[in-house]
Amino acid sequence: MTRRRLRDLGLATGRLPPGPLNAITDVAGVRVGYSTVARDTPHVVRTGVTAIWPRGPEIWEDYVFAGTHSFNGNGEMTGLPWIAEQGYIGAPIGITNTYQVGLVRDAICRLAVRDGASQDFHLPVVAETYDGWLSDIQSFSLTQADAFAAFDGAVGGQPIAEGNVGGGTGMIAHEFKGGTGTASRVVAIDGAGYTVGALVQANYGARELFRVAGVPVGQLIGTDIVPSHDPRPREAGSIIVILATDAPLIPIQCQRLARRATTGMAWVGGIGANGSGDIFLAFSTANHVRQKDRISDLRMLAAASMTDLFLAAAEATEEAILNALCMAETMTGRDGKTAHALPLDRLVEAMRARGAAA
Amino acid sequence: MTRRRLRDLGLATGRLPPGPLNAITDVAGVRVGYSTVARDTPHVVRTGVTAIWPRGPEIWEDYVFAGTHSFNGNGEMTGLPWIAEQGYIGAPIGITNTYQVGLVRDAICRLAVRDGASQDFHLPVVAETYDGWLSDIQSFSLTQADAFAAFDGAVGGQPIAEGNVGGGTGMIAHEFKGGTGTASRVVAIDGAGYTVGALVQANYGARELFRVAGVPVGQLIGTDIVPSHDPRPREAGSIIVILATDAPLIPIQCQRLARRATTGMAWVGGIGANGSGDIFLAFSTANHVRQKDRISDLRMLAAASMTDLFLAAAEATEEAILNALCMAETMTGRDGKTAHALPLDRLVEAMRARGAAA
Amino acid sequence: MTRRRLRDLGLATGRLPPGPLNAITDVAGVRVGYSTVARDTPHVVRTGVTAIWPRGPEIWEDYVFAGTHSFNGNGEMTGLPWIAEQGYIGAPIGITNTYQVGLVRDAICRLAVRDGASQDFHLPVVAETYDGWLSDIQSFSLTQADAFAAFDGAVGGQPIAEGNVGGGTGMIAHEFKGGTGTASRVVAIDGAGYTVGALVQANYGARELFRVAGVPVGQLIGTDIVPSHDPRPREAGSIIVILATDAPLIPIQCQRLARRATTGMAWVGGIGANGSGDIFLAFSTANHVRQKDRISDLRMLAAASMTDLFLAAAEATEEAILNALCMAETMTGRDGKTAHALPLDRLVEAMRARGAAA
Amino acid sequence: MTRRRLRDLGLATGRLPPGPLNAITDVAGVRVGYSTVARDTPHVVRTGVTAIWPRGPEIWEDYVFAGTHSFNGNGEMTGLPWIAEQGYIGAPIGITNTYQVGLVRDAICRLAVRDGASQDFHLPVVAETYDGWLSDIQSFSLTQADAFAAFDGAVGGQPIAEGNVGGGTGMIAHEFKGGTGTASRVVAIDGAGYTVGALVQANYGARELFRVAGVPVGQLIGTDIVPSHDPRPREAGSIIVILATDAPLIPIQCQRLARRATTGMAWVGGIGANGSGDIFLAFSTANHVRQKDRISDLRMLAAASMTDLFLAAAEATEEAILNALCMAETMTGRDGKTAHALPLDRLVEAMRARGAAA
């Protein structure tokens, strides 16, 4: 069966409707780009860079509020002290592999210089998950040009690639091939419609805990399709979740939203295993913190309305992970190691067996 | 059907085995007591106090390491700065209603004085959930004697009551009658057996998100049995989770464990709604921080072994919530309001319909 | 010499000008009240309650943004999870002794009920410092009426009492008699004037580290005037700092401001000794989070302007501590123990000797 | 006057005695190395890398406990989620300039690979301060070789260079030339001697707030010696403080220690200005968390003994900053900009004038 997104399999999770693209790019202004580096010489590498622009290039001067949560911190996300202090970000965000977070982080500084950002200093956000099972991570193969390509190639307002792309190229999740995934939800609050979009780099999880809409698919799907070599990746991975919304939030509310990625991940079977870097970031595009302003005028959603956004964030995260798994193709990497794609036919079958699909 | 614990219905959640009591009292030394205050005059009150002793009275001098997590902080847990600073607790823990946290907190200071604790000051941990839908919370009906009764009546090494008892007396969860619940898990690590026990005061959650072992019971169980009066409680509640373990953890590891209550709650359908105070505390009885010691000798479990404990914490929390729901009886409180017990026959039926029970 | 505030001694600290009252009540709308309980029968008690209203009674519906910092958490401040989650407070704040935090906390719930606050639940902020050296803290002598008196008697826009009043009655600081103190600073930012006011309950610190405007007064002032009995209080205490401002801050900015109490305390000689509960709260009255609003319109000061507020917060904290010390009278309490007032003549002399006063 | 350390000027701060080297290298096993990159072609750069090894190369397998504090987060320190989660570090630490944190961070991963570290992944700690006033930071001139040189050249048990070296090369503090500084303190606790060492990269602060041992030197020292060009650096900087101790601490205690760098910085006049990245890390070499161990045996100092360590940390930080200022030479950098060294004669004179020096 060709790879398809979860909903294109006739399956669904959650109770809220997705946006038109069912992607983080449903949030107006958000752009996503990838640089995928998959080659066999001089090193077998299966890696890349994912770029997320909260706004277009105006982000360098017109910051978005943001907040983070580390559910299990065996991973890296740079820029955390600044977000914790100021509550905003003023640069695009990167996601890549564990050993080259620094390269991508500095590349964003270079991008700011190249593009004439007026700010004097930058403290960019770059996160990572580990792709060393499939990719020769010790070759440090990514270059600044790879990073630039991801940031420069980012687009908004359209569907984005999933699976083995960008930073998600070499990922493994719930012992199947993982990668990049996205989804969105729309909620109506007091007559206004707000979108929450999620983009994940999914590289975590045990097979036995894998669930789809509550169905223990990981237990039902058979034990014959497993990563080809021992030690098989199990919990060495991580998951990065980026949540975007156009609801008018202040930083402390973004922190709250970020925390709900935990819920969505739990629904798929993520428990934040010891070796996992489960780090989440949420930003809101609704407010504008222009660096030239001495006073910013802001709007803030009432606390009582947050519950709908929380559910949206949990559901978008859940489905983004499932989309990553559904879209990722089987991949063979270094030393002939193979991570197999989630078998979609068996997935559908398991869902039907439990009355969770037609 | 008489109220029964989840496993006594032939149902189960999780993959790890419970301890002999399937209760927090499986952790040696932990004692639990209740003071249940349910009367109709002079005020209709449905409230109480739950007492948890991490050790026996030696806790006043021989502290246990502890850590906390606030997944959604619309609630109270006193004593947080001290735990964050020192990483331990040196007093029993209380759980009660929102308006009398203070009473119970000061009562623990009085208890220390009464019992001749040698420490000069105490910063006790008392948490709460709101029982104002069923109980006349504005009557401030609990007394110091009620608090003392809970602490003095605590017992260990035996089954403990669940449902409408102690601080959990007037609770509502997933729109059914909620309350106090407990469960435990045993894990084997490097030849040693460790227990993780959970005690919850469950007062949170929407019906539509309620799941048992992944089955969307809240959606399958019918819409006819709902709280009797509007506005029906939905997300105004909270959940307090106390996790105990005999694994040798240091404070930072207790924090990690506490965070996993989030996972267990998510599995049942908790998303940390805006109005919810979802605050978790984990303690470990294995190390002894005796106040007379100038240097404490400690043991610390390797990080790599934490994953099993995390799963145990998530599963124990999940099942403790379900036990609270399964054991709580229908209750009528102030203004004739009734919260109905989870119908156990329908629960079993729903589970069977989805192939999740024999 | 009769007790006088620092500036009335011809001394000064800091570089920014104080407000007209040099008090937290320079921030429009802020009200402060005290209940001072000092009697010798049936128990020798030297204690009380300090009440701070961020606004008048409209606070029950019109919340102020707030943020906290625990520099050393051997103390209690209730309400922390809610402030961390929502970033605001919607009730008056109390400060009292260590063993009756709960009483005052519940009293605020009662106050809300009495005054018909429309909100369903309250998670009040009450902090404490330990007065057990001078006061029979084990007598639990404060009553709900004492708490009500402090809240009901609060006034704004005028000077407020300092020294041995309210929660500060039985305090000891830097081995002299401590207590309640206040101060303020005014800063001009982009043509607007903003006020930062501090109120402290000072009960911490070693003599040898005590400094006034950099002068090591604690070392210069002689060793003959010390607390009368052993063990002399030294670091068993704590300091609570409440900062108020009318600058338009959001919660994350209030957190930043709260952190600067650390700086002011350090300038006086506070290092956050192990036994100290050095917990700080800052709130801003400029924004209004009305509970009936679905969207709140807010204003936010640019980050670049925060530095002036930070200095204001540090200076106001520093001078508030010094005012507490300068205004507190010598007090004899339980078991005949005496804490001596800071000798003002020697203070002035020490400052002159080091060229720090005319 | 040739540059001299503070004590070599006959001046002193603090009350505790320094270790034999009055340097972070007084803590046994700690090694420090520098790579200083100061050249005029092809770009005018004044930058570098500072390397701190908590232990020798055995750090890759034998971790040290650590904790951090961000007093003002306008800066970067990578590795924070991992330290917060696990409480230890297992790699050397780097400090460099703002735009090349990533380079140094990835270089540590490369170092681990080169040296055959057995761990699969690394989440190194690298911090930064901004040297763009004197150095062409936009040239991104540091190379991986520069980073390796710092780590490979590190030495322990001997004096280390201060002032314009390593990551501190291009720094400015209190409007004088800043840079790298170090100091230490020794405390006796229960018959055991413990050392606390500090290493700072000082690049923060306003002249007017600069104090030495309480004396307002910044105000007394004259206004004629200032940075040569406008806009003069004032608060755009930052300070990184690394604290090392051989006292047996657990992670939560390391966090406490890290927080005390705030106090030392405050004593010199640092208020955590908005643009400052004031981020602190403390580690303890006493416990060994060997990655092969399934259970680690630990020792923990009693909480009551922490106060002495707190004072030591504050004093060591204070003096390390002053040593940076006293040792840094006047430097001319890009565009002919000059940052002048603190005039030592005037410093001594000011101290004498206020009776703080002989």
Image: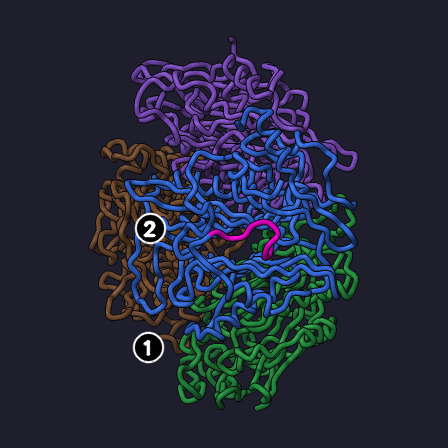
Chain colours: A green, B brown, C purple, D blue
Q: Is residue D296 magenta?
A: no
N-terminal of the two: label 2 or label 1? 2
Task: Give the residue at x 56% y 63%.
Answer: A77
Expressed as whole percent of the image width and height from the top left, the position of residue B203 reads 43, 52
Q: Main secondary structure of the magenta part?
A: loop
Q: Is residue C288 visible?
A: no
Expressed as whole percent of the image width and height from the top left, the position of residue A44 reads 56, 86
Residue B358 is tagged as 1
The answer to whether residue B213 is above or below residue A162 is above
**Residue type (three-letter) at the residue carrying disc 2:** Phe
Where are the magenta residues, as a range? D159-167
Residue C104 is tagged as none
In-image side of D262 versus C286 (left or right): left
Expressed as whole percent of the image width and height from the top left, the position of residue C40 reads 34, 13
The answer to whether residue B317 is above or below residue A217 is above
In-image side of A56 versus D285 (left or right): right
Q: Name the subunit of mark 1.
A: B
**Which residue is nearer to you in this view: D255 or C345?**
C345
